[in-house]
Amino acid sequence: MQVKGAIVRCLRLPMGPQDIADDVPLFGEGLGLDSIDVLELVLELERSFGVKITDEQLARRSLRSVNTIVSLIEQTRGQAPATS
Amino acid sequence: MIPYGSMRDNVVITGAGCISSLGIGVETFADELLAGRTGIAPITTFSTEGCRSHAAALVRDFQPSRYIEPMKLRRFDEVGRLALATCRLAIEDARLPTGSDAVGMVMGTATSGLHSTVAHVHRLMTEGPASVPALGFSNTIGNAAASLCSIEFGLRGPNVTIGQKQASALAAIAFASAGLWQGRAAAFICGGVDDIEEQFFRVHDRLGVLSPVDGLEEASRPFDARRNGFVLGTGGHLVVLETSSAAARRGAAAYGEVLGVGASSNDCPLNAWPTEPSGIVRAMTAALTQGGVTADDVTVVFASANSTPALDRVEALAIQQVFGARRVPVVSIKGAVGEFGAVGAASLMAALLCLRRGTLPPTVGFAQPDPGCPVDVSASARPSDGRLALINATADGGAQFSLLVRAFAADEVERRPNLG
């Protein structure tokens, strides 16, 4: 829920964190985010979770859904699972 | 596809969008103006603590989500929202086909980008570069409002933003009219949009140009002997200007016609009002000359007078010089809606709708004539059967625009189904 809250806050989404399913695609047909959102999301993940997304391939892989973002945070931290 | 115009085409006004301190929609705007109401009220959107002035004419009844999808709305700042919503109203009113190479946009604004710029600078200074939100950065650009409208409605003709302070909207309409006469597009959505940001208000307050509570109620009183400064206003006022051939091809009705434009500069310091009338006289005369009419033909002047001691006096002298002994009726709507960059477009629609209805609106705030302003200003609405209006806009720093228009009677051009 922490990740969902950060997404809603930084992208000013017109919905609550609870409205985002863990596996819904963030871009395109799912949540409907676009390339400008990617920029903001990458900065927010760095600010709030210390995750650095340095290349486009990693961004494509990791920003598909809340689940993939949580996985990335967990990998980065290499510690207890983050909550979605 | 809408055909481009030719130099022989007339320029007609086929639609208007209005989001104002007097309400939403041009007919509501005219109703309220004619009833003598004012949109000026104490500011509630931010604190005015420590200021000399505490009032403004703020847009009322505006719910952006009624006009803009939620996922888009989150991206736009105050002026962007106002611009998109007003543009939608203008397009709907004109029944203008969008998604066209032949439709352009000329936006007059003094505040586009301001809210986002202030927000960005604040975050930059207080939290550092990493905290500056990327999402809103595109809104910090001065032409953001015009660009958003073009993107949303597919206006692929010329896209221009004009910042001429208080004269921005009338400058935009003059520019768009010239563009249509030159055949550069079939239609332009043009006019202005402005909103007040707290620092913007505080700077005006600090400069001492706003009407303070100074033994009198804080108010805008154009041409009145007691005037002591202007009151800031807000709003979106956009019109659809179209070549007469393009309008005829699609069976569009029109509110009226632009007959002439005039532009000039007054020789005055950057933030000062003109101190002598020659610049205003030249712009008014140029508009009359281009329209092929004389001062005697003009029904009413919608003045730029904004309750500032200097500007109102100089504009009155300019009107006296152009009209000679004739006491042409003079109106200023700034007692009702305040001073802002979009107000020239508001004056245009006020002129067209009020002349169509055969009534000149009152100059709200005017009660005590000033011998230093020798013009025929009325405190109440009065009947009028003429059709020609001369509209003035003066910016501090000296930019001057005048527009000569002819109002069409309601039954002169019937609104027919959109053939576009």
Image (spheres, coloured by chain):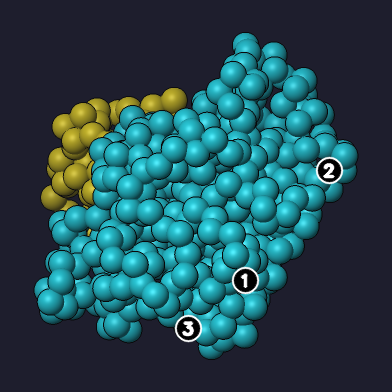
Image location of residue A33, percent across then percent down: 41, 38
Question: Which one is in front in this view, the residue at disc 1 or the one at disc 3?
Answer: 1
Quarter of the rendering containing residue B372:
bottom left
Q: Residues within 10 Å of mark 3 (few under 14, many from 20)?
A: some
Q: CA distance from mark 1 to mark 2?
A: 34 Å
Give me the residue at 31% from left, 73% from top: B225
Chain coloured yellow in this rendering: A
Instruction: For mark 2, name the chain.
Output: B
Label placed on residue B238: none
> Is residue B140 at all visible to an observer of this figure?
no
Q: CA distance from mark 1 to mark 3?
A: 22 Å
Q: Is residue B72 left or right of residue B269?
A: left
Mark positioned earlier in the residue sequence (3 or 2): 2
Q: Is residue B46 left or right of residue B203?
A: left
Instruction: For mark 1, name the chain.
Output: B
Residue situated in front as seen by the camera: B226 or B101: B226
**Quarter in which the N terminus of chain B is drawn:** top right
Instruction: For mark 3, name the chain.
Output: B
Q: Residues within 10 Å of mark 1 (few under 14, many from 20)?
A: some
Image location of residue B356, percent across then percent down: 52, 32
Identify which amino acid the numbered label 3 is placed on: Ala
> Is residue B305 at all visible to an observer of this figure?
yes
Q: Which residue is mark 2?
A: B183
Image location of residue B316, percent across then percent down: 50, 70
Q: Which residue is mark 3?
A: B272
Chain coloured cyan in this rendering: B
Q: Which residue is mark 1?
A: B321
Q: Residues within 10 Å of mark 2 (few under 14, many from 20)?
A: some
Q: Secondary structure at mark 1?
A: helix
Residue found farthest to the bottom: B269
